Image (cartoon, grey):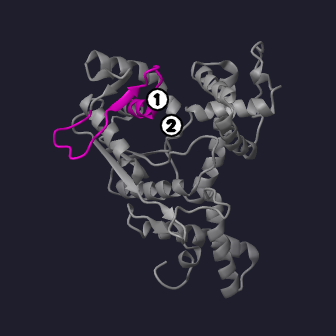
């Protein structure tokens, strides 16, 4: 059988954080098991590259470097092959722009307008967007490589956009969608429901698309390109209702065949010793590469304490053992349960590690 597993979900221009680790580790192991059982399994990173965050990044870049040729509408030449920023700069721009937009409505509107222009083919913004993708994906691959996680596809939200107009028209033509308070929605309630299931919104009242629209169009794209027998989505368990709505909508509107399986696997959060979602000392979200470093550093220290070996060999051992300890610590918990990340316990040479 052909199975697609959607287990990446990182956003472009943002670093991977600890939440991405869980989907990567769980998804990679499910992919390998299903492959071992003889299925054709396709792992997709499914990158977020199409929302307002892109407008914010481009607006933030324009604030910092207004003289870049991409912002000159009269420019008709070739754009530079080299990106005008590094991954470090890129990762600074987004949070700064996001914060600035909260108290600056003009900047927020500008970012919205840039998003609109980008999505409608503005030459300069498209060129910057391609640079952002290239710089981001190169960095993402490095971190995933450390976890020994590989994707067969690096598809993006933007890849699904061309399928949206026909899909929306199809929903209207077949009376699957109706107008409710100005928005276009598909009702997905079922008689057996014991709790309220909201309708699946396809277009906002201003005609704008949503995550729902993109996720449904991604299903259309996957059916067209790969005709999978099964699609598995691996993400935070708090998104269960969202995916239930998407799956129901895809079934009701016959975007998938009757026997196509759609599965959601939701994981719990990784918490600190205080039982709250794992944070840095400053209270921010912990970057995944810093988390990996904290574990490999601890193993390195223990290796040198217990063994006499040269520095390079100790580093190699620490990388292998550290990453394995992290994966084991994650997978030894029930997927849907929250668990406490404790670097001392994960790297202890005694007990279940």
Q: What is the crowding at mark 1: few (fewer than 14 residues within 10 Å), some, or many (at least 20)?
A: many
Q: Decide if residue 228 is in sight here.
A: no
Q: Residue at x 63, y 76 (%)?
A: 299
46 and 100: which one is in front? 100
**Left or right: where 238 falls relative to 119:** left
Q: Position of residue 149 (x, y in %)?
A: 52, 55
Q: Secondary structure at mark 2?
A: loop
Q: What is the crowding at mark 2: few (fewer than 14 residues within 10 Å), some, or many (at least 20)?
A: some
Q: CA distance from mark 1 to mark 2?
A: 9 Å
Decide which of tag 1 and tag 2 comes sooner along the chain: 2
281 and 68: which one is in front? 281
**Left or right: where 107 falls relative to 269:** right
Q: Is residue 80 above or below residue 331?
A: above
Region rendered in magenta:
188-217
State the image quarter where residue 51 is shown: top right
Residue lying at the far left of the rendered structure = 191
Residue that badge 1 annotates: 160
State the image quarter where residue 64 is shown: top right
Query: Can residue 205 be found in the magenta stretch?
Result: yes
Callout 1–callout 2 Cβ contact below 8 Å? yes
Residue lying at the far right of the rendered structure = 67
Q: Is residue 205 above or below residue 229?
A: above
Q: Secondary structure at mark 1?
A: helix
Report the predominant secondary structure element of the magenta stretch: loop
Q: Residue at x 80, y 27 (%)?
A: 66
**Left or right: where 240 falls relative to 307:** left
Residue 155's tag is 2
């Amino acid at each position: 059988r052909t199975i697609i597993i959607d287990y990446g979900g990182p956003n472009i221009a943002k670093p991977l954080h600890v939440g991405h680790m869980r989907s990567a580790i769980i998804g990679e192991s499910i992919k390998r098991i299903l492959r071992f059982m003889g299925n054709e399994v396709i792992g997709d990173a499914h990158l977020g590259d199409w929302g307002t965050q892109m407008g914010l990044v481009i607006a933030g870049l324009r604030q910092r470097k207004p003289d870049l040729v991409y912002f000159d509408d009269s420019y008709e030449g070739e754009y530079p092959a080299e990106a005008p920023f590094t991954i470090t700069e890129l990762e600074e721009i987004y949070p700064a722009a996001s914060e600035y937009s909260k108290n600056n409505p003009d900047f927020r509107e500008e970012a919205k307008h840039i998003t609109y222009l980008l999505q409608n083919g503005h030459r300069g913004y498209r060129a910057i967007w391609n640079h952002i993708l290239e710089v981001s994906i190169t960095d993402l691959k490095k971190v995933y490589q450390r976890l020994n996680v590989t994707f067969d596809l690096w598809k993006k939200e933007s890849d699904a956009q061309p399928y949206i107009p026909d899909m929306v028209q199809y929903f209207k033509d077949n009376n699957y969608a109706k107008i409710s308070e100005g928005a276009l929605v598909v009702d997905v309630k079922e008689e057996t429901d014991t709790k309220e299931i909201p309708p699946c919104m396809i277009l906002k009242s201003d005609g704008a698309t949503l995550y729902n629209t993109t996720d449904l169009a991604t299903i259309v794209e996957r059916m067209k390109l790969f005709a999978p027998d099964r699609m598995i989505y691996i993400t935070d368990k708090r998104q269960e209702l969202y995916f239930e709505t998407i799956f129901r909508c895809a079934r009701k509107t016959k975007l998938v065949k009757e026997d196509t399986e759609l599965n959601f696997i939701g994981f719990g959060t990784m918490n600190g010793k205080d039982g709250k979602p794992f944070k840095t000392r400053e209270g921010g979200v912990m970057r995944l590469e810093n988390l990996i470093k904290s574990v490999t550093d601890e193993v390195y220290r223990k290796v040198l304490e217990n063994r006499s070996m040269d520095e390079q060999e100790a580093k190699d051992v620490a990388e292998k053992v550290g990453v394995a300890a992290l994966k084991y610590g994650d997978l030894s918990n029930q997927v849907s349960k929250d668990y406490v990340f404790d670097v001392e316990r994960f790297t202890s040479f005694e007990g279940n590690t």
